[in-house]
Image (tube, rainbow, N blue to C red):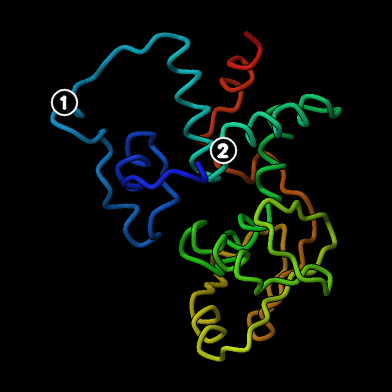
Amino acid sequence: MAKYTGPSNKLFRNKKVKDISNRKLTSSMRQTASGQHGAVRKKLSEYALHLAEKQKIRFTYLVSEKQFAKYYTEAARRKGVTGTILLQLLETRLDNVLFRAGLGITRKQTRQIVNHGHVLVNGKKVDIPSFLVKAGDVITIKSKSEAFLKSVTEMIDMACAPAWMTIDKAALKITFDRIPEREELDPEIKEQLVIEYYSK
């Protein structure tokens, strides 16, 4: 995923990924696949359904195949519901936490903010988008550019703030209060299909 340089919107549309594009444009995005025969309904095999769901989740969180497999292995190792733990691991990625907090319109944008060294976690600079945030961690945005800080502040919509984090818009500070519960995450994600995919 990190090396993909093709047309992103077409890829996300084919995989039925909804929250990658600009939030304002998501609702107007066509629901059929791209191409001349995109609207033709095809009956997918059981394997194809499992693979499609895995790819959908992978592209949603912008992780590579290798990264996703590692997250699954870690989720399977831990006690609890594997599918829920898998989604919780993906949700605690630093780039995703910034996206959920509204510090970027897309996950690509928040990933760039992290890569450029504008993020501190508990006072320490972190420039790795896949860094896993823990409950109680405090994330702040720092930059010498006032224009950049102003643009980030203007993007934050407090109405979209998730229940599992506290956002201080004025200070550009996020407190990650807790790990989200499954019912608080995207209900359209069918993680059980991913479990079945890796179980074969």
Q: Is residue 153 above or below residue 133?
A: below
Q: CA distance from mark 2 to mark 1?
A: 28 Å
The answer to whether 23 appears left or right of 196 in the picture is left
Q: Position of residue 71 (x, y in %)?
A: 70, 34
In terms of secondary structure, where does tag 1 sit?
loop
In the image, residue 4 sits, relative to residue 46, either above or below, namely below
* Residue 106 image label: none
Mark 1 is surrounded, within 10 Å at the Cα level, by few (under 14), some (14 to 19) or many (20 or more) other residues, namely few
Name which residue type carries label 2: Ser
Return the residue nearer the eye: 124 or 135. Answer: 124
> Closer to the observer: label 2 or label 1?
2
**Direction left: furthest residue:** 36
Residue 25 percent across, percent down from the top left: 31, 58
Q: Position of residue 114 (x, y in %)?
A: 63, 65
Q: What's under tag 1, amino acid-wise?
A: His
Residue drawn at 40 percent across, 9 percent down: 45
Quarter of the image for residue 200 reads top right
Furthest residue in direction bottom, as rendered: 146
Mark 2 vs 1: CB contact within 8 A: no
Q: Residue at x 45, y 24 (%)?
A: 52
Work out whether residue 118 or residue 23 is closer to the camera in this orientation and state it.
118
- What is the quadrant of residue 15 in the picture? top left
Few, some or many C-alpha atoms within 10 Å of disc 2 (few <14, some 14-19, many ≥20)?
Answer: some
Residue corresponding to mark 2: 64
Residue visible at 46% across and 64% down in the picture: 105
Spot occupied by residue 63 in the image (x, y as percentages of width and height): 57, 42
Looking at this view, is 49 or 179 the one in front?
A: 49
Q: As drawn, is 120 to the left or to the right of 52?
A: right
Residue 37, numbered circle: 1
